[in-house]
Amino acid sequence: MTAGAQRGQQEDRDPYFDNAKLLAMVLVVAGHAWQPLKDSRAVWAGYLFIYTFHMPVFIVLSGYFSRSFAFKPGQIKRLIAGIAVPYAVFETVYTLYGNAVDDRGNEISLLSPWYLTWFLIALFVWRLTAPVWRVMRWYVSLGLAVVIALIGAATELGPVLGLDRVLQFLPFFVIGLLMRPEHWELLRTKWVRIGAVPVMAAAAVTAYWANGRMTSEWAVRSKSWAELQVSWPVGAAMTLALLVCSLLLIASFLAWVPRRATWFTALGAGTLYAYLLHGLVIRTAAWEGWYEPAFWHTPAGQSVVTVLGVCLALALSSPLVRQLFRPVVEPRLDWAFHRSVRA
């Protein structure tokens, strides 16, 4: 989803990955649009369902396209221009905008990511560690990442650098690093696609059943076990179970992503723009009370919100939006680097 991941490290773009990013971004925007409507059991279930895997999909993809990261000058340049600078810009924008529109009174702090900017700082940290995971055997890397995720969930880390999510989502990034082209081909086989249908159906039913039995905060992965008010055995079991469920849903989702170019494939290159910009619209709607009319809390209103969320994701991924906002989302910082450093 980041600029570096979207450019990829391939000679030719694979439409499959652009399709996957665009479809996952639609789920991200829809999920954020649903947030004020979670008083509905159906919306709450849908929220839990997609939150279990939509960001993990992006993280796996980000890990896969970080395999060649080795601290080369050009890679460092992309890391700064494509992740660090947009993080600083949008963390500042969201803080100032929240203060102006909702009178939140927050101070600008690049050490405490707010709302959706956590993903950029997390990706910055994960990519820096990529060479470490690659030098170890796969089972050591994956096992260590899971242990770190458990430690992150067991510890109250506070808001600094969004470390709670950095650690708890780490296994997905490592899995992406470990994947090879043949693994993607396996995901797209006939039998995996057939098996994905009952997996997705069972997950949707389970999410509906879970209403009132658990909090959706488990899927967000931003709180410790103590904050979720569970003991460590329950917390560890829930964390591991959620990891398995997320992996099954990621595989099921990716199995049904179209392999060929479609009408929306080109929009997959603009998902970073949709990610960073849609929050301004969604938060404005919440802060300004646009969700308060009773209609939006009816099935018809919820359906309209869903459609509007899909349209917003598509619109913000468009070439026009990319052209307008490229200076802040994908800034050219050639002036800041030696001429010999190429992106």
Image (cartoon, helix red, strand yellow):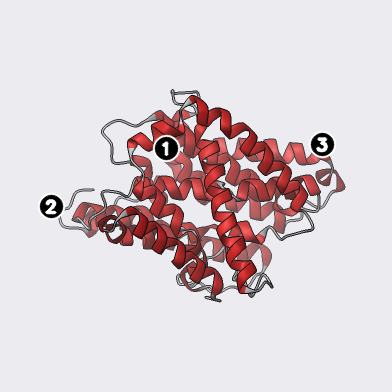
The residue at 64%/43% (across/down) is: 30
Q: What amino acid is at disc 1?
A: Ala
Across and down, in percent, residue 219 comes to: 61, 56
Dot label at residue 340? 2
Horizontal side of residue 284 vs 72, given as left or right: right
Mark 1 neighbour density, 10 Å: few (under 14) some (14–19) many (20 or more): many
**Pointer 3 residue:** 300
N-term-proximal mark, 1 vs 2: 1
Nearer-the-camera pick, 144 or 42: 144
- Confirm or deny contact between disc 2 and disc 3 (CB under 8 A): no
Q: What amino acid is at disc 2?
A: Ser
What's the distance in space between the residues labelled 1 and 2, CA to CA?
Answer: 27 Å
Across and down, in percent, residue 50 comes to: 62, 46
Question: Which picture quadrant has residue 305?
Answer: top right
The residue at 35%/50% (across/down) is: 177
**Pointer 1 residue:** 269
